[in-house]
Image (cartoon, grey):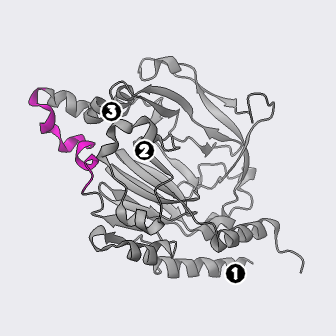
Amino acid sequence: MSDALETLRDNIRSLVLGGTKDVPRVSAKSLTAIKFHREYVGKNAPVIITDALEHWGALGLWDDENTKGDIGEQNIKNYQKRNLAYLSAKLKGQKISVDFTPDGRGDSVDEQGKYFVIPHKEEMEFASFAKLMTNPNHKQVAYCQHQNSNFTTEFKTISDDIKPLDFAQEAFGMSPDAVNIWIGDERSVSSLHRDPYENIYCVVKGTKKFTLLPPTDGPYLQEQPFPCKRYKMTEANQIGRDNVDVAWSLEDVMQSNESKRVQMVPWIPVDPDDPERISKNAKCLLGSRPEKLSPVRCEVRKGEVLYLPALWFHQVGQIGLTIAVNFWYDMQFGTRWALLQYLEERERKGKPND
C-alpha cells in the first residue's frame, strides 16, 4: 500500500501541477469560464489568477495607502496611523465578530498535542478592531475570521465594493454559498485543514501565504478526534489596553449546554511549516508521515485570486496587515469524494482480508 501511495502522490504532482512545485499564474484577461473549468476545476488543480479584481472598488478603497487624497489633507496623519480609516468610516457603529488568541493560533491543536483549541470570541465595533490591528497588543492577537458568510451579515454596508467573479460563477453554475472576509496580520495562522467547497480567494490588501497539500496526502496526516477547549481571556472587558496584564486559560467546550460530555473535533496535528511545533513524543503524531508530504507553497498578493480546489489541505498565514474576501461554492460530491474516503479509511485500518 505504501508503494501505491507514493506512486499516486507522484502522479498527482505530474498530472495536476505539471511536475513543478509552483502554483501557475494566469491572467483573467485570457480566462473564460470554459477554460477555467477545463484546465483547473475539472483537474482539481489550484491556480493564481491575476488582473481579476480590477473592477473592484475595494482594491483601492480598502487599501488606505492608495486613497489618502480622498479624505482631505487635514486627516492624512490620522489616516496613515490607523490605516483602516475608510472601513472604519463605512462601518461606523457596526459590530463584528473577532477571534482572540495568545499566539495567533486559533482552531488548532495545542503544542502538547492533547486538545483542539478554539479562539476566545468577542463582538466589538469595527473601529475598535481597526485600532487593535494598527496598534497591536502582543498579548492579544486579534483576527477577523468569523465564517458562515460574515461578509454578507456584518459587512453589508461595503457590499458594493466587491463583486463575484463572472468566470467562476459561470464555471460552477451557481451563486456562492458563503462570502467571508478575513482581516489579520503576520501573527495569525490558520492551521492545516480542508473544506468541502470550491474556494475563490481574493486578496485586497497585503499578501497571503498558502501551504497546499493535494487531497491524496490525507493518509499521511493522521486526522483524528481531539477534546475541544476554548481560550478564555481574564481581562476581556479591557481588550486593547497595553497596560493590562492579560492572562489566558483553557475551558472545556461541551457538546451542548445540557451535556456533561466534552465535544470532540476531528483535526490534523501535522504542521507542514513548523514540524516541531507539536512535541515529537505526542501520541497524536504516531502514524503520521510528514516526510511523505508533497507541499506546494505560494504567495497571493494584492489584486490576485487563488482558486483553491475543494478538499485540498491548506495552511494560511499573512505578510503584514492583510485583507481578503473569499467565495465558497458547494463542491460536487461524486467519485472523487468516494475514492478519497476509501483511500483514507483503508490506510487507517490497514489492508482488509481478501
**Real-space CA distance between mark 2 and mark 1, rounded to the nearest whole angstrom:** 39 Å
Q: Amino acid at mark 2?
A: Trp
Looking at the picture, how far across and down is residue 179, in whole percent? 45, 48
Q: Is residue 174 above or below residue 319?
A: below
SS under mark 3: helix
Q: Are marks 3 and 2 in contact (CB under 8 Å)?
A: no
Marks 2, 1: nearer the viewer: 2
Q: Which residue is depicted at the point 25% across and 35% down?
A: 86
Give the residues drawn in magenta, as a range: 55-74
Q: Is residue 279 above or below residue 210?
A: above
In magenta stretch: residue 199 = no
Q: Are marks 2 and 1 in contact (CB under 8 Å)?
A: no
Q: Return the residue at label 1.
A: 4
Looking at the picture, how far across and down is residue 166, in whole percent? 35, 63
- Report the side of 125 relative to 315 (left or right): left
Marks 3, 2: nearer the viewer: 2
**Real-space CA distance between mark 3 and mark 2, rounded to the nearest whole angstrom:** 15 Å
Q: Which residue is depicted at the point 54% across and 42% down?
A: 105
